[in-house]
Amino acid sequence: MLFKRFGLAVLLAGLFFGGGTVGLLLCRAHSAEPGQMYQEMQRFTDVLSIVRKSYVDEVAFKDLVQGAIDGMLSSLDPHSGYLPPDMYRELEIDTKGQFGGLGIEISIRDGALLIVAPIEDTPAFRAGLQSGDIIVKIGDRFTKDLTIMEAVKLMRGAKGTKVTLTIMREGFEKPREYTLTREIIKVRSVRARTLEKGFGYVRLAQFQERSYDDLRAALKALRKENQGSLQGLVLDLRNNPGGLLDQAVKIADAFLDEGLIVYTDGREAASKMRFEARSRDTEPAYPMVVLINGGTASASEIVAGALQDHGRAVVLGTQSFGKGSVQTVIPLGDDSGLRLTTARYFTPKGTSIQAKGISPDIEVKPLEIREAAEGLTVREQDLRNHIDTPELPSEKPAPAPGEEPGNAALQDQDQKDYQLLRALDLLKGWQIFNSLKRAA
C-alpha cells in the first residue's frame, strides 16, 4: 500500500519492484562505530579500485556502483530494492490501477519466486495461475536467485507479446508451462452486487487511489437495491495483494466507529504511526463476513485484522499470506527511487502477522461444487399412491429458489463458490437467530 507522507510513499504491498542507494543507507547507520564504518568503507573502496584497475574487461564506473547497490539490497528482505527511473514511474501508474504485464503480484519465499495472487480478469487469472504457485522459469530463464526486479523485467513487455511461465504447484507431478499474452492491465478495485434480498457482496481486488470512494458508492447502491438497508454483507478480500495504506485505513474505518485500526513500528520516528477509527460516516452495524485466503496480503490483511480484532466481522476462509512489513519509497536525484522496508505493522491487539498471516475465525477450504445427478434422491412425492396435500384457497404455490419478489438470484459463479455460500449461510443464520431472540 502507498501512503503519501512528507513527500515519501509508504507501501504495504505491490510486490513488483526491487533496488537501493549507498549514501542514504550509510547516513542512517546510527549503530555503527565511526572507526568501524571507516574501515568498512575503506574495504569497499579498495575492492572498487582493484576491480576498476585489474578486471579482465573495462567496466563502467556507473555499472560497478549499480552492482554494489543491487548486492547490498539483495542482502535485505525481498521487498527492499532499487527502482530505476522507468520502474519508479510505473509505481505511480500501478497505484492508479492501470499498468502493462500479466496481472500477478509476486514475492520471494525461501529463495523461490512465488505468486502472491493473480489479479482478476488478467492474463494470469484467465490462464488459471493461483496463489502459492512457484514460478520456476520465465521463458528460458530459471528464477532461482533472481531478484523481484529482474523477474518483473522479464515478465513485463509490450502489449500483445507472449511469455511462457513454468509453474510448479502442490499436486503437480512436474512443472507445467503456461504461455500468456501481455496486455494493458486495468484493475477495477471494487465490484458489488446483491446476493439475495438484503444480503450484499463487495469484492475488493486491490487498494487503489479511489477504492474508498468506490466502496462508498457501491454500498450506497446496495442499500438502494435493498429498500434502504442491508441485513448482512460479505466483504471479499481473497487474492487481494494489497495496495495503498491510506485506502486500507479508510475502508476499515468505514465499518468501525472507534478504536485503533493499525499501528506501525520501526527504528525511525517517521516509521511509528497510529491510525484510529472515527465515528463519522460509519456504516450501520449489520452483520459482516470477511473472506480471506492465501492470496490475501498486506493492506487487505490490515482490514481483515482490524475488523476481526474489534469483533466487527467474522473472518472466514483460509490463512492469509502474512506480509506485515511496511515499505517506504524514497525518490532519488536521477528520477529513480529506493524502496526500503522501514517498519512492521500490527493489528489493534498488537499482533504482527509477518510470515504468519491472519487466522480465520472459521476455516473453510475452497471446494468444487457439482450438481448431483437427477433421480438419486427419493422423496415422498415419488412414492406410488402417496397422499396429496390439498391446496387451500388462500395458499399460493411457493416460489422457486431465487424467484421471491424483489430477491436477486445467486449468479452461476456464486453457486460454485463454496466459501461464499458458507459466508451467506452464516449471515442468514445470524438473521434467523436474531429473529428468534426477538420473538422470545
Image (cartoon, grey):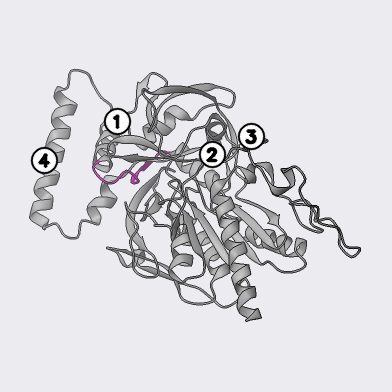
Q: Residue 146 falls in which quadrant of the image?
A: top left
* N-term-proximal mark, 2 vs 1: 1
Of marks 2 and 1, the one in the foreground: 2
- The residue depicted at 12 percent of the width and 36 percent of the height is 46
Specify which label sits upstream in the sequence, 3 or 2: 2
Mark 4 crowdedness (10 Å alpha carbons): few <14, some 14-19, many ≥20: few
Q: Earlier in the sequence, mark 1 or mark 3?
A: 1
Residue 34 forms part of the magenta stretch:
no
Eyeballing the image, is 301 above or below 156?
Answer: below
- Mark 4 residue element: helix
Q: Which mark is residue 368?
A: 2
How far across and how far down the image is residue 318, in percent?
Answer: 43, 50
Marks 2 and 1 sit apart, C-alpha to C-alpha, by 52 Å
Label 3 environment density (alpha carbons within 10 Å; few <14, some 14–19, many ≥20): few
Q: Quadrant of residue 135?
A: top left
Q: Are marks 1 and 3 in contact (CB under 8 Å)?
A: no
Query: Residue 418: in sight, yes or no?
Result: yes
Q: Give the distance between the C-alpha atoms of the residues marked 4 and 2, in whole angstroms.
A: 60 Å
Separation of marks 3 and 4 at Cα, in angstroms: 74 Å
Point out the stretch of residues depicted in magenta.
Answer: 75-84
Q: Is residue 118 left or right of residue 214?
A: left
* Type of amino acid under label 1: Asp
Q: Position of residue 80 (x, y in %)?
A: 33, 46
Q: Which mark is residue 63?
A: 1
Q: From the image, tell me which residue sits under label 4.
A: 43
**Is residue 5 among what the camera can see?**
no
Specify whether 287 is left or right of 193. left
Element on which disc 2 rests: loop
Q: Residue at x 28, y 31 (%)?
A: 145
Q: Amino acid at mark 3?
A: Ala
Estimate the x, y position of residue 162 in percent, counting from the top left.
Answer: 53, 21
